[in-house]
Amino acid sequence: MENIKQFFPIFDNNKGLIFLDSGASAQKPLSVINALDDFYKNDYANIHRGIYKLSDVASSMYDIARKKVCDFIGAGSPSEIIFTKGTTEGINLLASSFSSLLNAGDEIILSEVEHHSNLVPWQQVALKKNVVLKFIPVLSDGSLDYEWLRENISDRVKLVSVSGQSNVIGLKNDIEKIVSISHSVGAKVLIDAAQLICHYKVNVSELDVDFMVFSGHKIYAPTGIGVLYGKTQFLRELPPYQFGGDMVDRVSYDKATFKDIPEKFEAGTPPIAGAIGLGFAIDFINEFGMDKIERESLELTSYTISQLLQIDGVKLLSSSDANGVITFVVDGISSFDIGSYLAMKNVCVRVGKHCSEPLHLKFGVESSVRLSLGIYNDKSDIDTFIFELKKAISVIKGV
Ligand code: PLP
């Protein structure tokens, strides 16, 4: 988007910075930085514990942040919003709690495009509970094989957990289809929205997903804050994930009872400032509107892809219909060499397997280069990137 860099001090403080790694973590707008500064300087105290004014103010700021998240994702009630450290913790929370409802022989369906965060926790559940993991294949155009899902769904499947948008392929998955196929046998659906939430308006009620997770730091909020959304009834059915202060109702030396959601899943002092910062990041996003962010990100992505495909030897791993995430390799050249050259030119891209090792194995590549766009990127960033990429290729090839 044009002129948005002015809201992000990092660009003033790093002249010439071309930041194309927002899928790893996004830069922070001044409004979020100032909100944290103000909170720590003026209003800081622990929440839901003190009977003094500062604690009241901090508690209500934390509660307001929860309501902002609820409205942002279209949840039914703020109590369906559980604050976590991030996507990874959200999935681990669910894997730990949900596994207590599973029996040997039950099945969990993931897809072939998952981030390690939505793979490794379920592998651990499978090991401990003798649960079978199955994977929706990815097709050559980057979409998931929904027919495979239709054929493989059965009442043994208890959970279908897939990313809303892969961090390598960049294509939005058909969540409505996944939900309708999964719900036809009573399987629950978890959407890993770590990337999806950055580029698309998401409404959990309209999508009818049972659980969804995302990280604040990828949508301009501080690190250390994330969200697990769950339908009230299902969150209530799950046992707590961690135990300790603030999540208990009554405690004696030999037993304890637990509070209702959301506190039941927020043991100990939560990331108070992070949650408040997330609320301000949502305000920032809402000023532009997710519709506009989605549209402009799509336009910039297709411009980037068209420019990339004009370069000899470039092969896209991401879908040609990707949004905000563009992954590629260059024939005969190491992705690390490309990334290192670009880094010398102040162009920040991600190089490696992007926490998706099995998918890279499937593609038959050791590593790839990934650009991921944020609200502050514009055409001139892409033009600089393409210019430097062409130079990188000729320097590395020695031509
Ligand atoms: N899932 C996807 C699709 C991601 O892209 C990422 C991070 O890149 C994660 C999960 C993990 O997010 P976090 O490291 O914030 O927990």
Image (cartoon, rainbow, N blue to C red):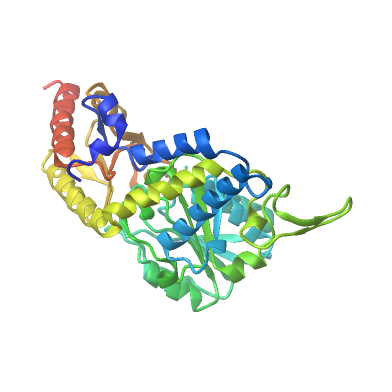
Quadrant location of the C terminus in the rendered image: top left
Q: Nearer the viewer, residue 89 or 127?
A: 89
Across and down, in percent, residue 358 comes to 43, 46
The number of callouts visible is 0
Report the residue at 36% width, 48% height from top. Answer: 167
Q: Nearer the viewer, residue 331 or 295?
A: 295
Report the residue at 49% width, 69% height from top. Answer: 76
Relative to 54, say whether 390 is above or below: above
Residue 308 sits in quarter: top left
Instruction: Using residue 121 as the reference point, say whether residue 276 is left or right of it.
Output: left
Across and down, in percent, residue 154 comes to 53, 75
Report the residue at 34% width, 48% height from top. Answer: 284
Instruction: Using residue 158 as the reference point, say whether residue 221 is left or right of it.
Output: left
Across and down, in percent, residue 386 comes to 15, 35
Residue 320 sits in quarter: bottom left
User: Would residue 123 be seen by someone viewing this image from the given angle?
Assistant: yes
Q: Nearer the viewer, residue 299 or 325?
A: 299
User: Would residue 334 be seen by someone viewing this image from the given angle?
Assistant: no
Across and down, in percent, residue 78 comes to 53, 62
Residue 162 sits in quarter: bottom left
Relative to 172, say whether 61 is above or below: above
Residue at the limit of the structure toward the right, as seen here: 253
Instruction: Using residue 89 as the reference point, say whether residue 8 is left or right of it.
Output: left
Instruction: Using residue 294 as the reference point, say whether residue 68 is left or right of it.
Output: right
Residue at the limit of the structure toward the front, as seen here: 53
Report the residue at 46% width, 36% height from top. Answer: 38
